[in-house]
Amino acid sequence: MRIVRLANFVTVHTGGLRTTLRELGKGYQRAGHEAVLIVPGRQFKDRQLRQGRVITLPSAPIPRTGGHRVLAGRRELTKLLDSLKPDRIEVSDRTTLRWTGTWARQRGVRSMMVSHESLAGLLGVWGMPKRDALADRLNRRTAEAFDTIVCTTAFAAAEFRRLGVPNLVEVPLGVDLDMFHPSRLDIAVRSRYARPEELLIVYASRLSAAKRPELAVDTVAALRNGKVPAVLVVAGDGTRRAALAYRAARLPVRFAGHIADRKAVAALLASADVVVAPGPVETFGLSALEALACGTPVVVDEQSALPEVIGEAGVAVAGTADAFADGVSQLMARPRDERRATARARAEQFGWSRSVAGFLQAHDVEPAEEPVAAPTLIRPAVPRPRLVREPGADEAGAPRYA
């Protein structure tokens, strides 16, 4: 089977989405299928990587979004899809790419939409009036346009379930249990940010309004007001960077920026005492699961999907600084070995092989008997295409889309 996947808003800062796209592609390839990923970027590229074929189409950045781009040219994308002749399409954008469901239906191609976010939740963050009614209308159109809707948690599925959507499937995401492991703990990394007597807290996510990174800063302020010697490392970048630096001016907060090296990310997560994930509309929270895989417990917002992901390996609290500070204290009251073992054991329930199998089942396909040979790269009808081959370029991290 040739599974063509389309995704928008894929940037260096969208770590969870990039990781998901990469790991699913690798899993499809291992299962004997041909995976093709189409994403927007600065210029045309066509590469064969471990996750399959990755095609980048030229697209202008959207103003005031931190560099996000979308596949806006319908005619160009339609020509490319027609040339690829997919057996299945998998779409990771419920807004600008919803029309591809109609394209697929007209050509007899089964289609899947992956819901990576709570639309009602995002509309609430953006301050949209009558958000539930608007979300219901858009979600109903999405469900009608695609053969299958995949959500990664019950939290994400709730807004479709209340509409009685019959083509809804829940498939949890996974985590790289080898890359993210308690053995990544590094005393040198820890000492870079905190003294032995200090509590090292890590926030590892995009710096955007939906993620509420300011709550991580305020949590450290609340802990220090309670005489807890806490320090915070912010690993990530985004549009809220300047505002956060101003908010943290008198606090022990270190901004590490975006960390491209996944091993370095794992070392930071494994070396922390606690990781905080304050986003109230998280529909899975891959970075929190990566922390658990490293043996580090997490404090999460009780309104998000994360409570069902972390189980007993963390604490779910209200979205306030005092509540998060109390959650950190609760975790630190547990014996160190116990909290680290519990975190790792929970993460081990979320391997990527299980997730890939679930997605393939949702696609109504089985693993192929023989591995698929690397496909011949085709130059679609785009101005002055440039072919770039980078074998193995995604072994150390997600592919860097231009």
Image (cartoon, rainbow, N blue to C red):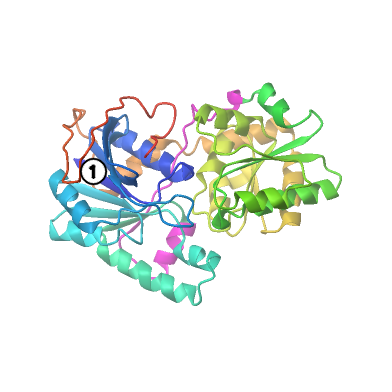
Q: Is residue 244 visible?
A: yes
Dot 1 amino acid type: Ile
SS at badge 1: strand
Q: Position of residue 314 (x, y in %)?
A: 64, 44
As drawn, is 163 to the left or to the right of 132?
left
Q: From the viewer's perspective, is 130 left or right of 269?
A: left
Q: Is residue 103 left or right of residue 287?
A: left
User: Residue 241 placed where, x, y %?
Assistant: 61, 49
* Residue on which disc 1 sits: 3
Question: Which region is colored magenta?
Answer: 155-184
- Residue 165 is a magenta residue: yes
Q: Is residue 54 left or right of residue 281?
A: left
Name the residue nearer the viewer: 372 or 64: 64
Where 364 falls versus 154 (above or below)?
above
Residue at 63% over, 50% down: 242
Which percent across, then down, holds residue 326?
A: 76, 51
Give the x, y percent position of residue 163. 38, 71
What residue appears at the point 19 percent right and 57 percent down from the top-left corner?
A: 75
Position of the C terminus, as image quadrant, is top left
Q: Residue furthest right?
A: 227
5 or 383: nearer the viewer: 383
